[in-house]
Image (cartoon, helix red, strand yellow):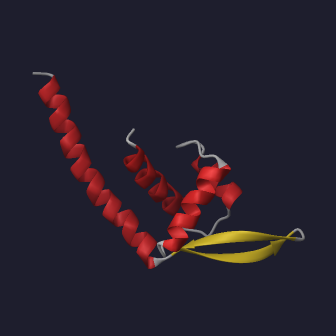
Amino acid sequence: MDAQLRRGVLDVCVLVAIKNKDSYGYKIIKDLKPVVELSESTLYTILKRLEEGKMLIVRSVEFEGRLRKYYHITQRGLKRIEDFKDEWEELMRVYSFIVEESDL
């Protein structure tokens, strides 16, 4: 998969993972495992990028004597999910065209 496309897909996967409930790094990785394998370093790079893009906000909560960062999706993050769905429909039309043409 093209690196830019993969990056966009992974960003949206992370946003969807926190769409209905705030979450933290390990849980996001666990929740996404059936769909896509993410390393911690990849996830935290994505989370930082999404935070900088104001698609999520971070809050720290003490948990078992340590601070745990929880991620919350913003309106901009929700909009990104919807925009991605529209983009994906267009990509699927292009994919169908390519597959149909290759069968000729």
Which residue is depicted at the point 44% across and 78% down? 75
Residue 73, placed above or below residue 103: below
Of 48 and 68, the residue lying toward us: 48
Residue 43 shows in the view: yes
Which residue is depicted at the point 47% across and 57% down? 11
Residue 74 position within the rendered picture, expressed as x and y whole percent measured from the top left = 49, 76
Return the residue found at the far right.
Answer: 65
Residue 20 position within the rendered picture, expressed as x and y whole percent measured from the top left = 54, 68
Lateral position of residue 39 relative to residue 81, left or right: right
Of 30 and 58, the residue lying toward us: 58
Residue 33, placed above or below residue 60: above
Q: How many marks?
A: 0
Residue 27 position within the rendered picture, expressed as x and y whole percent measured from the top left = 68, 56
Q: Quadrant of residue 58?
A: bottom right
Residue 18 shows in the view: no
Quadrant of the drawing holding the N terminus? top left
Return the residue found at the far left.
Answer: 104
Lateral position of residue 41 relative to residue 7, left or right: right
Which residue is depicted at the point 55% across and 59% down? 46
Residue 32 position within the rendered picture, expressed as x and y whole percent measured from the top left = 58, 49
Lateral position of residue 34 relative to residue 93, left or right: right
Quadrant of the drawing holding the C terminus? top left
Which residue is depicted at the point 16% across and 25% down? 102
